[in-house]
Amino acid sequence: MLQIQVLRVKLRRGRKGVGGMLTFPDKKEITTEEIQKALDFSSMQVIRNLDIFTDSFQKAYSENGFYQPIPNNYWTTGFWTGEIWLAYEHTGDNRLKDAGERQIDSFLERINKKIEVDHHDMGFLYSPSCVAGYKLIGSQKGREAAIKAADQLITRFHPVGEFIQAWGPMDAPENYRLIIDCLLNLPLLYWAFEETGEEKYKEIADKHIHTALANVIREDYSTWHTFFFDMKTGAPDHGATCQGYRDGSAWARGQAWGVYGTALAYKYTHRDSYLPIFKNVCEYFLTHLPEDMVPYWDLEFTDGSNEPRDSSSASIAACGMLEMAKYLEKEDAVHYTRIAKQIMKSVYENYAVKDEKQSNGLVLHSTYSNHSPYNTCNHYGVDECNSWGDYFYMEALTRLIKDWRLYW
């Protein structure tokens, strides 16, 4: 079990403020006017894309700044539908509502026909699309599809080890592992529990969170991307990376999933032991940011590096800080909200698309999968827009301008 301890790392940016928390006194916060302007542009960008991306979906990443259409058969397609719903919330434009409903039809067909659903990413697929549609417009098709997706997700639960397996055949030792990303898939199970009253969803989610937080977080509060277990006993075996620079480094998006994931874990369980985990995982992320507060693709790298950035990680972490701020004492809540605003100021000023001719996406300089000498990644979606980066950018902005009813 993870032992909570004081984080001791060399600070690269910021300084300790009152209470020992890291602050960035020289960084400006995004203003309400800038948030409004960013959401206005983002919503219009989504509307401009509806002609191509209503009956098809965005590829996970842009190519030369522009997304190409794909069928609903990849783990990232829910993020595009989530952008549609966020734009609908911001504008009330019925073109967006109609497009969102048509995409829900596609997600219902996908789960009914079991098209590329044998993995753990049911939450990424069905929370920002179908759960969102049910919450916003009462879509019964969205509710049906999301409950079926939750049923699909729990088929990947291993009682031996008590975790949801990420990928691959369930009887293969080399796939007997979880990944940190799955913390964002679990809200689908909590939602299914709330809707149906069936304890199985909550029990599996609770067990996975417990297992994940006990194993993917290292002693210095950096995070493993993926963690393996013994197939016969369920005992913890070893951590590794698939998408980080090397096994011992901190993959930026993984650390950001840790920030947001622990916030959601606390939201649904209210386990006090998760609060210091959140604070320390967040602190590690913040201490390894470069000057402009937007990370490189791995936290191994900082200012002066020629490595690519991952702007999506900044928006994900900001969402996590804003979510956790709801549950913290006032001083801490103000602290994390301020940092989220500072991060989003940089994302908006330095990374967001400002001209539709430049890109049909929303945020530049993200990294999907970057090969290194020490990982097994393919090299694609590097220094491009990606669909989750665009989605979480809009989510963070929405959180900053209204009391948002989250899709997760």
Image: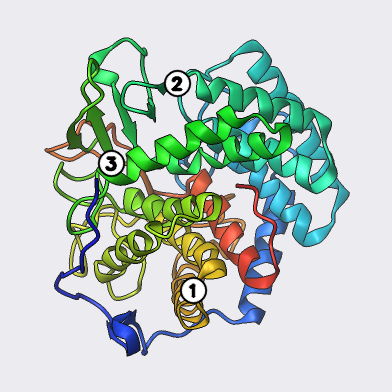
Residue at 76% x, 41% y is: 133
Instruction: Residue under label 1, please give it.
Output: 349
Task: Single out the mark in the foreground, 2 or 1.
Answer: 2
Residue at 47% x, 72% y is: 340
> Dot 3 surroundings within 10 Å: few (below 14), some, or many (20 or more)?
many
- Three-letter amino acid code at disc 2? Arg
Q: Is residue 20 above or below residue 405?
A: below
User: In the rendered view, does 42 fall on the left or right side of 15?
Assistant: right
Task: Single out the mark in the foreground, 1 or 3.
Answer: 3
Residue 229, percent from left and from top: 23, 26
Q: Quadrant of residue 191?
A: top right
Q: Are marks 2 and 1 in contact (CB under 8 Å)?
A: no
How far apart are labels 2 and 3 at the CA level?
A: 18 Å
Residue 225: which disc?
A: 3
Q: Quadrant of residue 9?
A: bottom left
Q: Earlier in the sequence, mark 1 or mark 3?
A: 3
Task: Single out the mark in the foreground, 2 or 3.
Answer: 2
Residue 196, percent from left and from top: 72, 31
